[in-house]
């Protein structure tokens, strides 16, 4: 990290980009619909409420339980496990933002996905057995899954390397775009019959 840039490869041509992404466009047959979903094993913990006055990937100040505090100082004070993401409810979906770095010299915290003003975040509750928890979150009708991708942080932090994640066998990514940029989730696309 910080020494080599991540790269995206377009399989059909072998083209490599360092400052872009690959988007998948799906043409559906008549009578079919696409359903984009996520598998997120994290839930909000029962601890402090966190809000931010700025939207973005980097923050200095947070509102912790209604009180302003430097966010890097706060994380150090509570000895936060930054392998656990912040979790927020976005219109009913639990969405994670993961920590990239906590810079105590600059007194700033950088995330892998953006935080948003007006949203209440809480640190994720710890998980004892990630693979078991993950398997329990796999949706029904898995045969309808046409594509999936799994965040690399799931492998780095949750010891998924060499373990099976059910029928989800898509690529490992640096984050998924499903609803918005996500971290520590698995994004998937299901193709199913339209219900009229």
Image: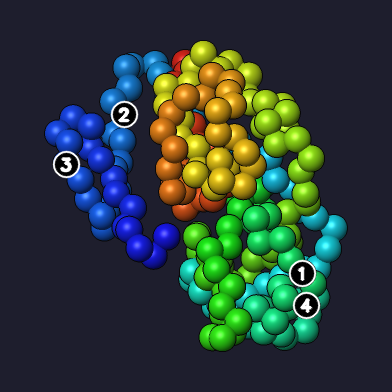
Q: Are marks 1 and 3 in contact (CB under 8 Å)?
A: no
Cα distance, mark 1 to mark 2? Answer: 45 Å
Residue tagged 2: 26
Q: Residues within 10 Å of mark 4 (few under 14, many from 20)?
A: few
| Residue in view at x 68 percent, y 31 percent | 131
| Disc sitting over residue 15 in the figure | 3
Q: In the rendered structure, which disc, 4 or 2, sits on the residue that comes first in sequence? A: 2
Relative placement, left or right, of 46 versus 17 is right
> What is the secondary structure assignment of the residue under circle 4?
helix
Residue tagged 4: 77
Quick check: 145 above or below 85? above
Q: Are marks 4 and 1 in contact (CB under 8 Å)?
A: yes
| Residue in view at x 51 percent, y 13 percent | 143
The spot of residue 117 in percent (x, y) is 58, 72
Q: Quadrant of residue 170?
A: top left
| Disc sitting over residue 79 in the figure | 1
């Amino acid at each position: 990290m910080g020494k080599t840039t991540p790269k995206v490869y377009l399989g059909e041509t072998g083209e490599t980009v360092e400052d872009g992404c690959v988007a998948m466009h799906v043409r559906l047959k008549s009578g079919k619909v696409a359903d984009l979903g996520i598998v997120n094993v994290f839930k909000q913990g029962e601890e402090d409420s966190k809000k931010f006055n700025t939207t973005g990937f980097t923050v200095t100040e947070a509102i912790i339980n209604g009180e302003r505090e430097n966010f890097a100082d706060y994380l150090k004070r509570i000895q936060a496990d930054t392998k656990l993401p912040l979790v927020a409810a976005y219109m009913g979906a639990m969405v994670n933002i993961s920590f990239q770095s906590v810079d105590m010299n600059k007194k700033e915290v950088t995330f892998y996905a953006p935080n948003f003003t007006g949203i209440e975040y809480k640190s994720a509750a710890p998980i004892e057995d990630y693979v078991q928890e993950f398997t329990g979150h796999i949706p029904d009708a898995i045969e309808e899954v046409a594509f999936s991708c799994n965040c690399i942080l799931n492998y780095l932090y949750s010891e998924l390397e060499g373990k099976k994640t059910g029928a989800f066998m898509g690529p490992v990514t640096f984050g998924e775009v499903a609803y918005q940029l996500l971290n520590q989730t698995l994004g998937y696309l299901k193709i199913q019959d339209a219900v009229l």
